[in-house]
Image (tube, helix red, strand yellow):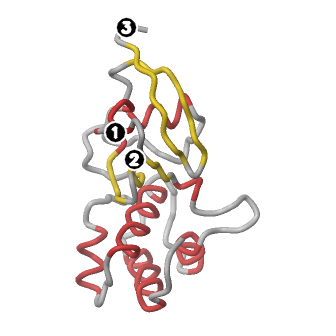
Amino acid sequence: MSDAATITLIVNGLSMTRTVDARLLLSDFLRHELGLTGTHVGCEHGVCGACTILLDGRSARSCLTLAIQADGAMIETVEGLGRIDELGRVQQAFRHHHALQCGFCTPGFLMAITDMLRHHSLENDEEIREALSGNICRCTGYEHIVNAVRELARERGPLK
């Protein structure tokens, strides 16, 4: 490994220390080093949003972030939203409103929505659509996704 660095980060509540190549992308680290394949890689340019994770509580494109840049950070991936036997609240809303089809973009949407609902009140459909604008879905037409987020925004309860 050329230009290797040892990093420590907290991923979905668990501390992880690994030695990584300085050029390794965070998306590749999560998928290939940690086996967290819910973080999808679509465009590899930060445009589609499929690789969205939470980095220190805020949404970030893992395909644009080097793993060494996340040293000392807290990372949340879609795998951290729920348990095997119980979906998280955002996942439940997506299921209830049929807000996915092929599912490729879904993890990125779930993470971006989690960030938005933790930090902002989304008062109307225009704000919801703006919040979703950083993620691309080629299947759904977004209407069911908007419906799911609308339900979550109306609840106004804290997201975990």
Q: Is residue 36 above or below residue 50?
A: above
Characterize the local packing of mark 2: few (<14), some (14-19) or many (20 or more) Cα atoms within 10 angstroms. many
Expressed as whole percent of the image width and height from the top left, the position of residue 54 reads 41, 55
Residue at 36% from the left image edge and 72% from the top image edge: 142
Tell us which disc is closer to us: 2 or 3: 3
Residue at 35% from the left image edge and 11% from the top image edge: 3
Position of 78 compared to 130: left or right? right
Which is nearer the N-term, disc 3 or disc 1? 3
Expressed as whole percent of the image width and height from the top left, the position of residue 94 reads 53, 73
Which mark identifies residue 51?
A: 2
Contact between labelled residues 1 and 2, with CB atoms less than 8 Å apart: yes
| Secondary structure at numbered mark 2 | loop
| Secondary structure at numbered mark 1 | helix
Amino acid type of disc 2?
A: Cys
Expressed as whole percent of the image width and height from the top left, the position of residue 14 reads 60, 45
Which is nearer the N-term, disc 2 or disc 1? 2
Q: Is residue 148 above or below residue 84?
A: below
Quadrant (top left/top right/bottom left/bottom right) for the N terminus:
top left
Characterize the local packing of mark 3: few (<14), some (14-19) or many (20 or more) Cα atoms within 10 angstroms. few
Q: Nearer the viewer, residue 6 or 91?
A: 6
Tell us which disc is closer to us: 3 or 1: 3
The residue carrying mark 1 is 63
Amino acid type of disc 3?
A: Ser
Which mark identifies residue 110?
A: none
Q: Quadrant of residue 71?
A: top left
Characterize the local packing of mark 1: few (<14), some (14-19) or many (20 or more) Cα atoms within 10 angstroms. many
C-alpha separation, residue under disc 2 versus residue under disc 3: 25 Å
Q: Quadrant of residue 113?
A: bottom left
Quadrant (top left/top right/bottom left/bottom right) for the C terminus:
bottom right
C-alpha separation, residue under disc 3 versus residue under disc 1: 20 Å
Which mark identifies residue 2?
A: 3
